[in-house]
Image (spheres, rainbow, N blue to C red):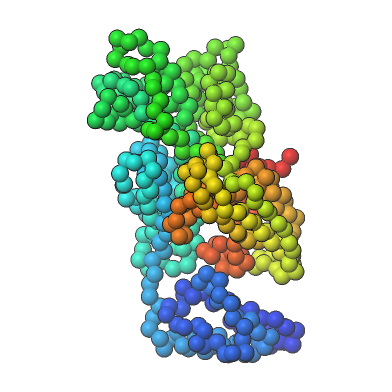
């Protein structure tokens, strides 16, 4: 840390930020004199003083101490996230190429679990090198966020159900419905997993077959049928062919029954209506038509206050402070475990008090009113179920520390969060 001597007289408040990950096992608190104010956020230490010379001496002392101590232990960049095993198996089989594009040079490891639809597995993320430091941690966090967005978009449109299908017909059905996965069980039932619209079309196809064809009428077993719903957008599917085949029923679209959306994708009117009854988004690109309503519990509050303190990267502006509170309660029908209690949450987030920050604030307000900010699920930090958790709209919950500590500076954050909100249909009029 250096500073021109001529500036010493006009500097009244100095903040020294120390990355705990970069100094190994050094006990920072031990080396901070009592007349310094010290705060810790995540792995970052913030030291406050009004005396530049003393801060400069402290920097030299820490550098000297680090040189005397053992070199910092190389700590590989790692991260993990809990997932539904069935959803992840589907992604591996049907979207493996897209998964590879997301991970890039990083490693995404998935340990398969049993086939129980409620089972939870762990996806681990790590850098390819065992000597990864802060730069890899930032990139790894970006890979993790991209994966979570892709995973939730896929899960939101995925349905698992059990149908009465003769096992010898599953191969023929697989060719006709390539986005579905068929798995024969020990009984006469066959487990089918895939996008909601394609599962519905399969059911219609089976119900129209004569009895001697080897197919039985569709029977839905509520105990073995499950939709993986969330408020994220539907995953992108393949583009419709040029001969105007409906991407849902995969049959030619009669001109009088064609429905073209503003995103230029076309469908049979009846097919599109059934898809919109499930979720008002284009089954091809995920463009939202109408208003999405999430599963955020009722009774929450979103309060705004301001602070004159600035955020790193926005030194000429104050700070908008968002206080969220979701009270504990009982889960409803659209939640993972209806009738069971859930634990509420209080969260604080920060935005720069500038024109772009106020724009994001209004969009977050719309998302909160549409119950899209939070949901109920498994906490990624504690691993506990039936908890109020964030729902794929990233917030800055720390003022400092950068992306690895969910704080600032992060010059791309305001643009990223607007893209996440746009995917849910939240945008300026």
Q: Quadrant of residue 158?
A: top left
Q: Residue at x 43, y 78 (%)?
A: 24
Q: How many marks?
A: 0
> Which x, y percent locates residue 177?
39, 24
Q: Is residue 341 left or right of residue 396?
A: left
Query: Can you say whether 244 is above or below 44 in the image?
Result: above
Query: Can you say whether 232 is above or below 274 in the image?
Result: below
Q: Quadrant of the C terminus?
A: top right
Does the image show residue 155? Answer: yes
Q: Quadrant of residue 129?
A: bottom left
> Which x, y percent locates residue 333?
53, 38
Q: Residue at x 30, y 23 (%)?
A: 170
Q: Residue at x 56, y 32 (%)?
A: 279
Residue toward you, 182 or 332:
332
Query: Can you say whether 370 is above or below 184 in the image?
Result: below
Q: Is residue 1 left or right of residue 185?
A: right
Q: Is residue 325 left or right of residue 246?
A: right
Does the image show residue 250? Answer: no
Q: Is residue 384 left or right of residue 89?
A: right
Q: Residue at x 39, y 33 (%)?
A: 223
Q: Quadrant of the N terminus?
A: bottom right
> Which x, y percent locates residue 290?
65, 32
């Amino acid at each position: 840390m250096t500073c021109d001597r001529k500036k010493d007289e006009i500097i009244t408040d100095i903040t020294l930020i120390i990355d705990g990950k970069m100094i190994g096992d050094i006990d920072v608190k031990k080396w901070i004199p009592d007349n310094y104010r010290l705060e810790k956020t995540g792995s970052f230490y913030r030291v406050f003083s009004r005396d530049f010379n003393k801060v400069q001496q402290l920097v030299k002392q820490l550098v000297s101490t680090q040189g005397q101590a053992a070199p910092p232990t190389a700590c590989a960049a790692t991260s993990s996230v809990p997932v539904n095993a069935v959803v992840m198996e589907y992604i591996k089989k049907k979207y493996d190429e897209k998964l590879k594009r997301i991970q890039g040079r990083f490693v995404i490891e998935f340990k398969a679990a049993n086939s129980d639809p409620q089972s939870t597995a762990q996806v681990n993320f790590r850098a390819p090198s065992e000597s990864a430091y802060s730069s890899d941690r930032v990139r790894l966090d970006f890979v993790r966020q991209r994966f979570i967005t892709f995973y939730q978009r896929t899960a939101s449109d995925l349905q698992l159900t059990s149908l009465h299908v003769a096992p010898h017909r599953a191969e023929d059905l697989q060719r006709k419905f390539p986005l579905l996965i068929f798995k024969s069980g020990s009984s006469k039932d066959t487990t089918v997993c895939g996008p909601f619209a394609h599962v519905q079309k399969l059911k219609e196809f089976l119900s129209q077959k004569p009895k001697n064809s080897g197919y039985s009428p569709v029977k839905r077993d509520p105990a073995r049928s499950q939709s993986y719903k969330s408020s994220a957008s539907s995953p992108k599917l393949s583009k419709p062919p040029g001969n105007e085949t409906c991407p849902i029923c995969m049959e030619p679209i009669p001109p009088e029954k064609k429905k073209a959306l503003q995103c230029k994708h076309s469908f049979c009117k009846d097919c599109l209506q059934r898809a919109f009854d499930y979720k008002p988004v284009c089954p091809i690109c995920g463009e939202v038509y109408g208003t999405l309503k999430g599963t955020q519990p009722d009774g929450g509050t979103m309060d705004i206050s301001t602070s004159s303190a600035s955020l790193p990267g926005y030194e000429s502006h104050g700070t908008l402070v968002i206080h969220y509170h979701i009270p504990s309660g009982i889960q409803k029908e659209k939640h993972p475990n209806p009738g069971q209690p859930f634990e509420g949450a209080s969260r604080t987030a920060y935005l720069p008090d500038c024109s772009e920050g106020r724009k994001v604030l209004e969009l977050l307000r719309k998302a909160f009113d549409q119950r899209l900010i939070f949901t109920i699920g498994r906490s990624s930090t504690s691993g506990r179920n039936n908890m109020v958790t964030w729902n794929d709209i990233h917030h800055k919950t720390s003022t400092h520390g950068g992306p690895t500590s969910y704080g600032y500076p992060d010059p791309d954050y305001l643009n990223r969060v607007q893209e996440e909100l746009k995917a849910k249909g939240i945008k300026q009029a």
